[in-house]
Amino acid sequence: MSGDLLVQLFLSGIGMGFIFALIAIGLTLIYGVMNVVNFAHGEFLMLSMYASYLAFATWGADPVVTLPFVAVMMFVFGLLVYYLLVRRVMQGSMNSQIFATFGLMVFMQAAAQFIMGADYFAVRSGLLSGVLEVGPFTLPAPQLAAVVGASTATGALYWLVFRTATGRSLRAASQDRQAASTLGINVDRMYALAWGIGAACVGIAGSLLSNFYPVFPRVGAMFVLIAYVAVALGGFGSIHGALVAGVIIGLLKVLAGFFISSQLKFVPVYLLYLIVVLVRPRGLFGRL
Amino acid sequence: MKSLALAGLLGVLLVVPLALSDRPFELRMMVVIFLYAMLGHGWNILGGYAGQISVGHGLFFGLGAYTSTVLSLKLGLNPWFGMAAGGAVAAAAGVLVGIPCFRLKGHYFVIATLVVAESAFQLFIAWDWVGGAMGLQLPVQEQGLLNLQFHRNKVPYYYIALGLLAAVTALVWWLENSRFGYILRALRDDEEAARSLGFSPASYKLLAMALSAGIVGIGGVFFAQYVLFIDPFSVLALSFSVVIALIPILGGAGTVAGPILGAIVLVPISEYSRVLFSGTGRNVDLLIYGFLIMLISVYRPDGLAGLFRARRERREYVPG
């Protein structure tokens, strides 16, 4: 096989990987801050993909243009989910926390199917369709945009979480909620912020993804499984971990799809999950 | 008093088919209620009593259905043997899944069951030897109890499903008051305390998993014989795993009545919504289910059975 093809595979693996990473970062941020797994995270992705597609289909607005709006919309949606649902079960048992977002997952998926039907919708001939010729390589533009967009978003998140006062409060709330509140940090607001940012991350991922992936009601279920694996591999609650693991999984998936069979491309990823669970349950960078 | 009411209920259930023999819709609904209540019991042993929430039990249902169907198609084996084999394969798979996954707790365990079940779903879609995405059709055989196939008159399915449900209900009832049942609940409520009393969490959880998966697997075999056609989408899909968990969660996890109550509420919702929105493929039942799960988790975390219990406790409360 030619080096050209290898580079393209590598790029598309990295592109996918950054999108997985962005989805996983949203998940791990919420988990890290408040110890709750958002089982509806995949459906957040689906919602943002439908939003990108509908904006394109009705106004002809390209996903690249609507990306900031989708991110803001998802931020607000994350806040709503926190205040209307998650906050009400925080005092309850762990089971009711699990079921709450699980019910949201079932509901959102069924609602999508009810409103949009089971059909696949794709953004066709958007600004980013086509390829870029870089030297000897032809690179698909949507994947390049995914790399650029997802790494920018990840960078911004890093800056927010590790370099700002808000980020410090967020991390304080995640480490010790009681100590944080005695220091005057509004923990409740930090939780809401985590949900908002987490949802915005997955919103950006969905917006970038809609350039080259069709949207349908179960699309989120597929991607979120990968995100779970990324979070488990990276270590629950670790943002670095989610980033590294997302890229590893993206590469693994693309290479497996090429060398084994496109139908079985997810199997090595799931095997990787089992190995992590058996050998290193806390993941690469996890605290546990 | 309680046993008298129960005997009366069983008597009514035994004569119900006489009224339903020419009403296939209602008959089918009763069969599905019995089947789902049985699946709910299965899930409940692990999820309700042992406190290990699985959202991947569709895997065991599918394994049961595929085991008996493949044995029948490839080796010509009798479905009753298939039922035993299906239960055994599902139980064995449960143990295999449990060994790595029980190292995880809480949310992590839930995710693990999700990942395992979804991988199996995708493997079965790609696995041509068992029909891949096309599924498997069971050949029509002479009807009768021996072949576990009934074509014109479906009433026997009713009695078989009722019999299975009665047997599993009796088993769970016994389990609830047995030493094993107490140990499971102790593990659920405080694993460290149970461990300090000398009970190994891993082996009891594995036993609960085997029992739970085996029951669900047997349910899968019954389903395959009832529908005579299986594919990954109908027996292994994640949405079906969700339904299996939802039955006892709605009814009341960790109670004998829970799965039965859950099935009585959930099955008519899905059957009637299927009639109302027939052929649209709009999944209205899942829309309602999802909403119900959110409502329950916010307002009634202990399910419908908790509602009854709360009323009884109020009545029995003597001030002073």
Image (cartoon, coloured by chain):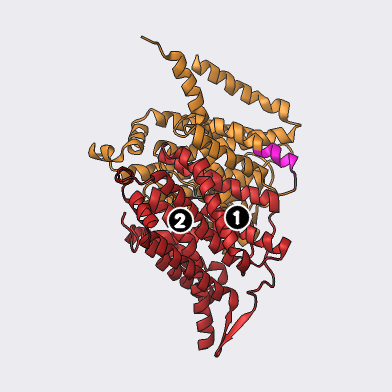
Chain colours: A red, B orange
Label 2 lies in what chain?
A
Q: Residues within 10 Å of mark 1 (few under 14, many from 20)?
A: many
> In the drawing, does residue A25 fall left or right of residue B186?
right
Magenta segment: B270-279
Task: Let me know if residue B262 is in the magenta part.
Answer: no
Q: Which residue is mark 2?
A: A27
Q: Secondary structure at mark 1?
A: helix
Q: Quadrant of residue A206?
A: bottom right
Mark 2 vs mark 1, CA separation in Å? 15 Å
Q: Which residue is mark 1?
A: A47
Label 1 lies in what chain?
A
Q: Main secondary structure of the magenta part?
A: helix
Can you say whether B80 is above or below B10 in the image?
A: below
Residue that sits furthest to the top in the current view: B320
Q: Quadrant of residue B155?
A: top right
Can you say whether A124 is above or below B108 in the image?
A: below
Q: Measured from the top left, where is residue A93 in percent x and y?
A: 41, 37
Q: Measured from the top left, where is residue B291 in percent x and y?
A: 59, 40
Q: Would you say residue A120 is visible in this rendering?
A: no
Name the amino acid type tagged 1. Leu
Instruction: Name the N-terminal-most of marks 2 and 1.
Output: 2
Residue that sits furthest to the bottom in the current view: A136
